Image (cartoon, rainbow, N blue to C red):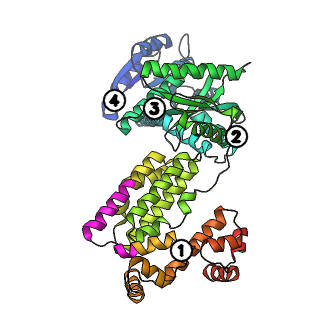
Amino acid sequence: MMNLMVVDDEHSAVESIAASIPWREHGIGHVYKAYSVKEALQQMAAHQVHIIITDIRMPGLSGLDLVSHIRQKWERTKCIILSGHASFDYAKQALRHGTVSYLLKPVRDEELIEAVQQASVQIRLEGEKQLMHQRAMYSVREHLPEKRAGLMKDVLLGHKFVESELVEKLEQLEIGFRPQDKMQLLLIRYDDPQPTHKAFRLMKYAISNVVEEIFGSSYHLCHTDDAYDDLVFMASPKQAQSEPELLMGRLGERLLHSVKQYLNATISLSVSRIGRFPEQVPQLYHQAVSALRKQAEAGKGLHLNAAAGSHGATLKSLAALYEPPGLTALLEAGRMEDASRKIDSIFAELSDSVFPEHVYVAFHYLAAAFSYMAHREGRQLSDVLGEQYQQLLKDGYGVSLRSLEAWTRSVMEQWAQSTTDTGQESGSNMIRQVQQWIDNHLGDDLSLQVIAGEVHLHPVYLSKMYKQSTGEGISDYIIRSRMERAVHLLKHTNMKIYEVGQEVGYNNTPYFIQVFRKHYGLTPQDFRNG
C-alpha cells in the first residue's frame, strides 16, 4: 500500500480529508498530517510518502514551494494541489512543477479519490518502467562481454559498418575506441594442452584478466576468440605515446612473464603493426596470425613483432577441400578410409591457414556432404549431424577450428559404425578397390580390360557388377572423375590446357576440349576465364 500526506494550515480541512474517506479501501495504508510546509518536509524526511495533497496559500512557504522541494528531493512522490483559488497563474505554476491534479475547494470525495488513484497509477507505472530498465541494464551488463566479443569478431572478419551505427554500438558496449583510432592487435596463443575444454576456457579467461591488468592502464582494450581458439585483443592507446613500439614490447614481455609466474602457463604473443580501426583490423589480424604460423616450429613462449614480417595475406581457396575425389563421392562409394584421409588433409590445411573464413567454408562443405548422405540413405538429419551441429550453425563465422574438427570426426565415426552395424555399406570392397585404382591412374590407359586385369576379374563380369552396385557404368565414373580433376587443375594451377588434358588421360587436346564442353557446356579456356 501507499502512504498519503495532507498539508493545510486549516486543521479542520486536514482532519476532514484524513477521516472522512476510507483510504485503505483505495490502496492507502497510512495518512500523515502536516499544517505547514516546514512540518511537511520534516515528516517527508522521517517517513516514506508517496502522494501529497496540499493547499497553496499557507503562512511562510506556500504549497507551490513544497511541490518544488519535493520535485528536487523526492522526484517519485506525486503532488495534488487543493486550493480555494481558481487562479490561472497558480494552475500554470502547478503544471510546471508536474502536479498530478489541480482541484478547487470545496471538493467532492469522489474527485479527491479519483485524483489519488490517478497518482497511484502513475507511481506504479513509473516503478514498473524503472524495474524493466534495471532488468534490461542487468541483462546488458550480464551479456556485455559476449556482445563485445561478437562485435569485435565481426570487425575481425571485415564486416562493413555504417560509421554512425558502429559508434552507437561502441558506446552502448562501453568500448573505449572509435572509428579511425590507431590500434594494434595482440594475438595470444595458449601453448599448454588442457585435459578438458572447460579447463582450456578457464585458463583463457585467466589469461585475459592478466592482459587487462597489464595493458589496461595504457590502452583501451576489447577482445574476442578467433576460429583457432586464440585470444585476439584490440588495443588502442588512451593517450599519445612517444615510443609505442617500445611500450608494447615491454608490456608484452611482462605479460609472458606474469602468465608463467602466476598461472604456471605458457603463451605465445604476436603483435601487429599499428593500423586504423576498423577497416585495417582484418589485415592486422592476418599479419599477426601469419607471423605466429610461420614460427610454429620454433616452440612455445614466443614473442613476435608481426610488423617486421608479413604485410598481410591473400585469401585463397582450400586445396584439400576441392581436390577430387570429393568427400561426398568417397562416402557415397563407402570408401571410409579414403574419406578419413580426406578429412585429415582438410584439417591439416585448415590448421596452417590464417583466414577464419576458411573454417566457415569448410563447415558448410562438410555439413553439405553429410546432409546429402543422410538424405541418400533415408536417415534422419538430426541423427547424422548430431546436437552439436545446431551450435556450430549458431556460431556462424565464429565457428572454431577445434569445435569443427571434433564434430566432423564424431559424425564420421558414427557414420562408419552405422554402415558396419546395418551391413548396408555404399559399395563392396571390390567396387572401392576399382574406384581407388581409377582415381590414382586418371592419366593412364583406363580401358575396361586394364582395370579388370588389376582386380583379376573378367571385363564383362566387372562391368555388370559395377553397374548393379553403383547405378552407373565404369566409363561414366572415369569421365566424371577425369572432368572433376581437370576442373581442379584449371582452378588451382597455371598448367596449359593441353597439359591438363594429358594429366587426366587425354593426349588428344581437341578431344579433351570436346569432352569437357559436353560435360560442362564450356571449353576449358572459357571455364578458366570465367
Could you say where residue 179 lies in the image, as x and y percent from the top left? 70, 36
Circle 3 packing at 10 Å, graded few (<14), some (14-19), many (20+), is some
133 part of magenta stretch: no
Could you say where residue 109 lies in the image, as x and y percent from the top left? 40, 33
426 part of magenta stretch: yes
Q: Left of 11 or right of it: where is 501? A: right
The amino acid at mark 1 is: Ser
Taking the spot 69% from the left edge, 77% from the top edge, the residue there is: 523
Disc 4 designates what residue? 1
Disc 3 designates what residue? 204
Q: Which residue is more in the foreground, 30 or 174?
A: 174
Q: Mark 4 or mark 1, which has the lower sequence index?
A: 4
Could you say where residue 208 lies in the image, as x and y percent from the top left? 49, 28
Judge whether residue 90 can be spotted in this image.
no
Image depth: mark 1 or mark 2 in front? 1
Could you say where residue 514 lies in the image, as x and y percent from the top left? 67, 83
Residue farthest to the bottom? 460
Disc 2 designates what residue? 280
Alpha carbon separation for disc pair 4 and 1: 82 Å
Residue farthest to the left? 421
Secondary structure of residue under mark 4: loop
Disc 1 designates what residue? 481
